[in-house]
Image (cartoon, helix red, strand yellow):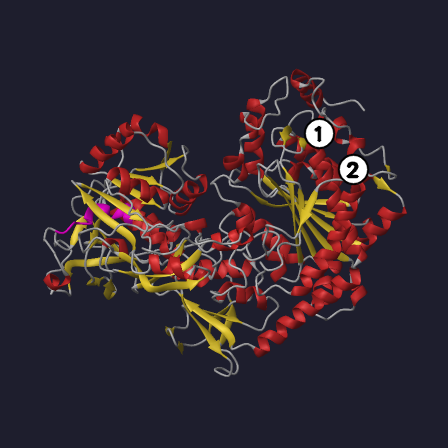
């Protein structure tokens, strides 16, 4: 076939790097033995101009080829289901016979009816999902889409026709296109004419940045959390079909053999059906048979768990699907030497392709069992809902309707029905007002997923977790929520089906004196940033007050922002236009102040002891040099994506070179920051002259040791105890007792402190996945957030860790000269899924200048009385 000029140019470029040692493989290497392929369907090397393994498969080459296959074959249809942060498409391929394509909507409807028990077993083909490319650094999990889609486009014969007639296969290419592109750039940057297989070579070192998406999020933790557009696209498409089997393709360390599920038997979420594991093992026999036929190393039923329900191989299991994890030992630079020989990407691609075929074939082989399992799964959901103590869940977010609506949007993406409360409800945790509250009935198709989201789990069969153990999302969102017991309502007071769309606030009146907005709204920080970036003066309230507005009296809490008309460089009309933007685009209600007098003695709008002037923050986020890109990315996403704030990203090693007079805040995320004494000295001087350091997790530890000169205490050791001796095979389980894999803890929040402004209740759920504790400041007012005495709300923490953490600081605020050091024991924006504690970070940024230190000497609590 005559190549296009682009393919020819690509081929010439490849020659520059190709050598006799390069392990390129022709298309025949990936094709199934004994299967005839249609020569009219062009193979990859003839389309792209190079073979898999000859060089890194470029993103445009991958997309160009798979789109070509959809044009060349009537068995494949491609749809763009979303876009990444950088605007790259996420593609979903539907693979089935032409006859099935002609009635695809009918087949989907019949499949969904069948799983509900409303259609016979033979109403539709079986439905299989193959998920390629969730981690950008995992080469073969993306490139395997090439032979997989070519096989179904070009294979001939009775067997392939029967497979296509009896299945609908859905395949994603790629789940994480931004990470994929970053990997390509890295590999091409370090490519050499002579391939280097030494694992120490930089070409193989691309795990962190290339694994994740644009903002540093691990998308394989996003199936439940849905803060990233890639995850929303994938989960929406998945839920629209509810496939019967889901294959999720990954890579791990290059010394590892190939792995496939089922995972460790004792590490299973209690909501997952045991039968799912049995059927997964039946399909695993097909993978094993292929691997055995070529005497390949492989493992199953070890290391990997099925507990956290937000991973691609576990999430499906709460929606009636089998979830199967596949992991290949990575050859990220193309080929790498491992302890069991040379590992090549081309060989990994072939294995990932062939186990996708055994997944499809295994599903066909146990078709009747799969259909029965899925029907029984959802029938059991109905039975569980009928027996459940809770007939529904009700939730609200007082003072912050956007946070409640965001939660509604998450639930709806999971195909969970949510209704507006038709009337006021009173339950154990308080009142739920109609118009502000939502109800999730327990009796619906996604009952088990609803339980996974709302229920709290603190006891487990085995305390070893591959990921976070506690994900009770209403706690993460800091929602007021309750289980409504059976018999409490008949029927439930359900209003309209809710979608949770963002809602603008009404446009404010023109103010004769100034404008005020409350700090409790999700996007109040975004609104304040607009004001400060516009060069306007804004003042924050240190105390609650009652404002006389153009529409009557209105209550405002601490942190509320007052924007006067006086002493501004902009006209009243310009200020009013900005307030209209805030109401429209941020959804923040803005009140027009009719007078500077309030209804509170000593709290008028001009009172300097009550209203403090704020300055525009100029924020630096440190990354690299030991700092976790995940943690840094979560901070970046929160400020940039959520609150539209300009953020300076700087490697930790370059911090000393900045002109710090231009910046107000430095965020040190988790990880292991590596900064020299010169950097420490520069930062210390900057803080004393008015700067603010915000440290989270290990960033807080670094700040305690280096900026505050606080030495970590040595762990207490019991005296005169005989040495402990344990059997070696207990080590993994016993080690887990000393690790916090991620749980939700209760804290006590001082709502009068600027860190607590915008909150209505003192009890605040927080994420906790570090074991260290912050040192308590001498200043009794400098610990605005403290862990409760019995802190565990959801997830696992050993008794030893609970005793260590109970009553210790969760957040400390220390004044250093004119500046502040604000430390978080953990990440307040963990995986961008803690809207409840996100405000702590925003308060630390916007209100650090008003966090005064005490001037008294308090030797004991009695002196405070």
In the foreground, 656 or 119:
656
Across and down, in percent, residue 217 comes to 49, 44
Identified at 30% across, 28% down, the residue is 656
Across and down, in percent, residue 486 comes to 51, 81
Mark 1: which secondary structure?
Answer: loop
Residue 295 in the figure: left or right of residue 224: right
Q: Residues within 10 Å of mark 1 (few under 14, many from 20)?
A: many
Provide the residue designation for mark 1.
52
Q: Which residues are magenta?
A: 844-854
Residue 544 in the figure: left or right of residue 523: left
Query: Along the polypeptide, which appears first: circle 1 or circle 2?
Result: 1
Identified at 72% across, 39% down, the residue is 351
Across and down, in percent, residue 314 comes to 60, 56
Residue 759 appears in view: yes
Q: Quadrant of residue 574?
A: top left
Across and down, in percent, residue 59 comes to 62, 32
Q: Quadrant of residue 711?
A: top left
Provide the residue designation for mark 2.
72
In the foreground, 413 or 632:
632
Mark 2: which secondary structure?
Answer: helix
Q: Residues within 10 Å of mark 2 (few under 14, many from 20)?
A: some
Q: Label 1 to label 2, Cα distance in Å? A: 20 Å
For the N terminus, the quadrant is top right
Question: Is 726 located above or below residue 65 in the figure?
Answer: below
The dot on residue 861 is: none
């Amino acid at each position: 076939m005559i190549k296009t000029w682009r393919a020819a140019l690509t081929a010439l470029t490849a020659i520059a790097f190709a050598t006799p040692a390069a392990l390129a493989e022709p298309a025949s290497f990936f094709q199934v033995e004994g299967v005839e392929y249609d020569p009219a369907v062009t193979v990859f090397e003839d389309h792209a101009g190079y073979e898999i393994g000859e060089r890194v498969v470029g993103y445009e080459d991958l997309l160009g080829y798979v789109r070509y296959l959809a044009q060349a074959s009537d068995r494949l249809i491609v749809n763009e289901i979303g876009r990444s942060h950088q605007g790259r498409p996420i593609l979903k391929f539907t693979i089935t016979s032409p006859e099935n394509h002609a009635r695809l909507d009918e087949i989907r409807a019949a499949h969904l009816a069948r799983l509900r028990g409303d259609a016979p077993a033979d109403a539709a083909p079986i439905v299989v999902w193959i998920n390629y490319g969730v981690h950008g650094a995992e080469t073969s999990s993306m490139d395997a889409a090439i032979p997989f889609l070519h096989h179904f486009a070009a294979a001939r014969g009775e067997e392939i026709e029967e497979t296509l007639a009896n299945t609908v296969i859905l395949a994603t290419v790629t789940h994480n296109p931004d990470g994929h592109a970053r990997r390509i750039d890295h590999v091409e940057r370090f490519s050499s004419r002579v391939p280097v297989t030494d694992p120490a070579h930089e070409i193989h070192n691309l795990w962190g940045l290339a694994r994740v998406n644009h903002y540093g999020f691990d998308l394989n933790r996003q199936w439940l959390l849905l803060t990233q557009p890639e995850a929303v696209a994938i989960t929406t498409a998945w839920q629209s079909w509810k496939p019967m089997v889901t294959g999720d393709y990954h890579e791990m360390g290059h010394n590892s053999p190939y792995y496939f599920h089922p995972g460790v038997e004792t590490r299973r979420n209690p909501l997952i059906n045991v039968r799912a594991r049995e059927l997964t093992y039946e399909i695993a026999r097909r993978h094993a048979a292929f691997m055995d036929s070529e005497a390949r190393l492989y493992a199953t039923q070890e290391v990997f768990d099925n507990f956290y329900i937000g991973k691609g191989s576990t999430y499906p299991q709460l929606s009636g699907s089998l979830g199967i994890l596949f992991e290949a030992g990575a050859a990220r630079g193309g080929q790498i030497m491992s302890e069991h020989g040379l590992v090549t990407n081309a060989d990994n691609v072939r294995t990932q392709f062939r186990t996708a075929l055994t997944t499809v074939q295994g599903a066909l082989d146990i078709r009747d069992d799969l259909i029965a399992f899925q029907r029984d799964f959802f029938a059991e959901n109905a039975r569980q809902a009928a027996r459940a103590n809770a007939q529904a869940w009700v939730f609200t977010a007082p003072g912050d309707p956007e946070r409640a609506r965001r939660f509604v949007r998450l639930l709806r993406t999971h195909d969970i029905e949510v209704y507006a409360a038709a009337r006021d409800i009173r339950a154990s945790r308080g009142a739920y007002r109609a118009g502000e509250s939502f109800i999730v009935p327990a009796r619906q198709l996604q009952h088990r997923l609803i339980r996974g989201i709302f229920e709290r789990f603190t006891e487990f069969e085995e305390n070893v977790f591959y990921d976070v153990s506690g994900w009770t999302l209403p706690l993460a969102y800091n929602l007021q929520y309750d289980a409504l017991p059976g018999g409490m309502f008949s029927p439930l007071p359900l209003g309209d089906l809710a979608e949770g769309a963002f809602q603008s606030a009404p446009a404010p009146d023109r103010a004769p004196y100034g404008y005020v907005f409350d700090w409790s709204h999700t996007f109040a920080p975004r609104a304040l940033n607009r004001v400060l970036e516009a060069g306007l003066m804004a003042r924050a309230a240190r105390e609650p007050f009652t404002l006389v507005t153009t529409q009557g009296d209105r209550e405002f809490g601490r942190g509320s922002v007052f924007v006067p008309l006086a002493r501004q460089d902009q006209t009243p009309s310009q200020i009013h236009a900005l307030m209209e933007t805030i109401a429209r685009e941020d959804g923040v209600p803005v009140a027009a102040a009719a007078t500077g007098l309030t209804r509170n003695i000593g709290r008028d709008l001009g009172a300097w002891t009550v209203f403090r002037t704020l300055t525009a923050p100029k924020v630096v986020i440190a990354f690299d040099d030991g700092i976790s890109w995940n943690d840094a990315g979560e901070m970046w996403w929160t400020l940039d994506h959520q609150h539209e704030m300009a953020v300076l990203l700087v490697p930790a090693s370059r911090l000393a070179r900045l002109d710090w007079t231009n910046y107000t805040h430095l965020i040190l995320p988790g990880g292991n920051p590596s900064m020299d004494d010169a950097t420490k000295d520069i930062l210390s001087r900057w803080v004393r002259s008015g700067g603010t350091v915000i440290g989270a997790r290990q960033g807080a530890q670094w700040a305690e040791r280096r900026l505050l000169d606080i030495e970590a205490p040595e762990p207490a050791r019991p005296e005169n105890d005989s040495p402990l001796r344990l059997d070696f095979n207990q080590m993994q389980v016993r080690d887990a007792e000393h690790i916090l894999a991620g749980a939700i803890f209760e804290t006590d929040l001082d709502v009068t402190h600027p860190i607590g402004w915008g909150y209505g209740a003192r009890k605040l759920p927080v994420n906790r996945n570090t074991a260290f504790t912050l040192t308590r400041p001498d200043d009794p007012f400098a610990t605005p957030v403290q862990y409760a005495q019995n802190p565990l709300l959801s997830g696992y923490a050993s008794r030893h860790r609970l005793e260590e953490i109970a009553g210790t600081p969760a957040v400390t605020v220390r004044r250093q000269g004119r500046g502040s050091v604000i430390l978080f024991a953990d990440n307040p924006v963990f995986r961008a899924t803690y809207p409840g504690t996100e405000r702590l970070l925003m308060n630390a940024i916007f209100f650090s200048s008003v966090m005064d230190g005490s001037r008294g000497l308090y030797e004991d609590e009695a002196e405070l009385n």
